[in-house]
Image (cartoon, rainbow, N blue to C red):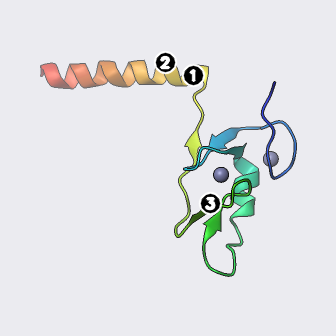
Amino acid sequence: MPLRCAVCQKVLRDPVSITCGHRFCRQCITRYWEKPAPSGDYDCPQCRKRSRTLPVLHHLSEPNDARGSENSKTTCRHVLSQ
Ligand SMILES: [Zn+2]
Ligand SMILES: [Zn+2]
C-alpha cells in the first residue's frame, strides 16, 4: 500500500523523510516550511515534532543510488591504494 503524504493527502511524490521518520513529498514539506510557525520553529505536519532549525530532508533510496554508492566505494579504494 503506497504511503500518503500528510500535507496533500496524495500518494508520495519524490518522497523524503525527516528526522522524526515521517515522509512527505519533497515539494509539500518544502512549501510547508517556507513560512515557519510564529514561534520560529519548524514542525512536522504529522506528529508536530518541533525543530529549532530547518530539518534535513533525507532522500529515500532509489535504484540509482545503489550504483552511485558502488562507484564511490571504488573511488575510495582507489584513493586508499595510492
Ligand atoms: Zn504531498
Ligand atoms: Zn513526524
Q: Pick whichever, 44 or 28, lies toward us.
A: 44
The residue shown at (67%, 73%) is: 36
Pointer 3 residue: 49
For the residues bearing labels 3 and 2, Cβ distance under 8 angstroms: no
| Ligand 1 within 8 angstroms of badge 2 C-beta | no
Crowd class of label 2 (few under 14; some 14 to 19; many from 20; radius 10 Å) = few
Q: In the shown orientation, is residue 2 left or right of residue 51? A: right
Q: In the shown orientation, is residue 60 left or right of residue 7? A: left
For the residues bearing labels 1 and 2, Cβ distance under 8 angstroms: yes
Task: Tell me where residue 17 appears, x and y as whole percent.
Answer: 62, 43
The three-letter code of the residue at mark 1 reads: Asn
Pointer 1 residue: 64
The residue shown at (62%, 67%) is: 42
Sequence order check, earlier mark of 3 and 2: 3
Pointer 2 residue: 67
Looking at the image, the residue that sits furthest to the right is 9
Q: SS class of the residue under badge 3?
A: loop
Q: Whole-Å distance between the Cαs marked 3 and 2?
A: 34 Å
| Ligand 2 within 8 angstroms of badge 3 C-beta | yes
Compared with 6, 35 (above or below) is below
Task: Tell me where residue 75 appears, x and y as whole percent.
Answer: 30, 23
Crowd class of label 3 (few under 14; some 14 to 19; many from 20; radius 10 Å) = few
The three-letter code of the residue at mark 3 reads: Lys
Q: SS class of the residue under badge 1?
A: helix
- The image quarter in which residue 47 lies: bottom right
Q: SS class of the residue under badge 2?
A: helix
